[in-house]
Image (spheres, rainbow, N blue to C red):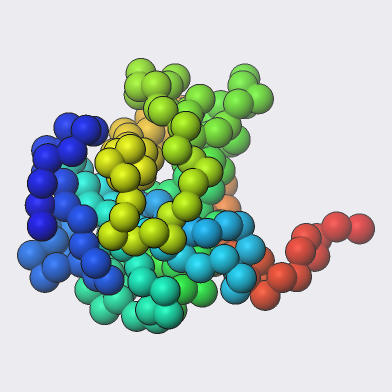
Amino acid sequence: MPSQMPSQAARFAVFDGDLSREWASFYSDGDALAVDTEAMGLCHGRDRLCLVQIADQEDRVCCVRIARGQTRAPHLQQVLESGHIVKVFHYARFDVAALRQGLGIAVQPIFCTKIGSRLARTYSPRHGLKDMVQELCGVELDKQTQSSDWGRADQLTEQQLAYAANDVRFLLGAMDRLRQMLAREERLELAQRCFTCVPTLAELDRQHFGNIFEH
């Protein structure tokens, strides 16, 4: 049920298994959503998807807890596969693969802020979420809960949920800044071409091919 939480989002909710119809409707009305995932680890197929976080332009943030053995989330799939909504990730390659592996969701279209940062912020070697958000949005993220047990489902702590929510709350603002920078440097079209490659790279990761582009 919707509730207040430490990140002070305009509205916050935690759902089990899927979005509610009401929240799916909220998210379907916009043209961009920030999305992130948490898993038991970084190996697709071994480490299961545990949590999906979403934020919209109205600062409505939710966390969807994914149960062990769950393979579908129809409302979530409808939103994340919608062709008129840009899904914004930081390092989309991992999240897109995790959503495909865990729930069969084929995410499109995509904006990856890590790719955008590497193409736009060439003056900096720091392209992690924390450094990027601090520069572009003026917000310092707390990453202390990043490595923790996300498989506890209904026993997730307030600190875990706050961390998960804050990881998506500032992505849309970061995307706007990166788009401006990419357009200014005449790299926006190149970035868009990179984003279209993400599902293919994610599929290679999901099938454990490694870097097939190495010599």
Q: Nearer the viewer, residue 199 or 154?
A: 154
From the top left corner, tell me how far across and down residue 134 is, in percent: 42, 21
| Residue plotted at (31% across, 55% down) | 155
Q: Quadrant of residue 171?
A: top left
Q: Is residue 189 visible?
A: no
Q: Is residue 59 left or right of residue 208?
A: left
Is the residue 201 above or below the residue 73 in the image?
A: above
From the top left corner, tell me how far across and down residue 125 is, in percent: 65, 25
Is the residue 155 above or below the residue 204 in the image?
A: above
From the top left corner, tell me how far across and down residue 108 is, in percent: 40, 66
Q: Is residue 204 left or right of residue 158?
A: right
Residue at far front of view: 155
| Residue plotted at (16% across, 46% down) | 12
Q: Is residue 85 left or right of residue 150?
A: left
| Residue plotted at (27% across, 41% down) | 158
Task: Tell me how many marks there are.
Answer: 0
Q: Quadrant of the C terminus?
A: bottom right
Q: Nearer the viewer, residue 82 or 18?
A: 18
| Residue plotted at (51% across, 68% down) | 48
Is the residue 86 above or below the residue 191 in the image?
A: below
Residue at far right of view: 215
Q: Is residue 76 left or right of residue 115?
A: left
Q: Nearer the viewer, residue 71 or 114?
A: 71
Q: Quadrant of the N terminus?
A: bottom left
Q: Quadrant of residue 19?
A: bottom left
Q: Is residue 129 visible?
A: yes
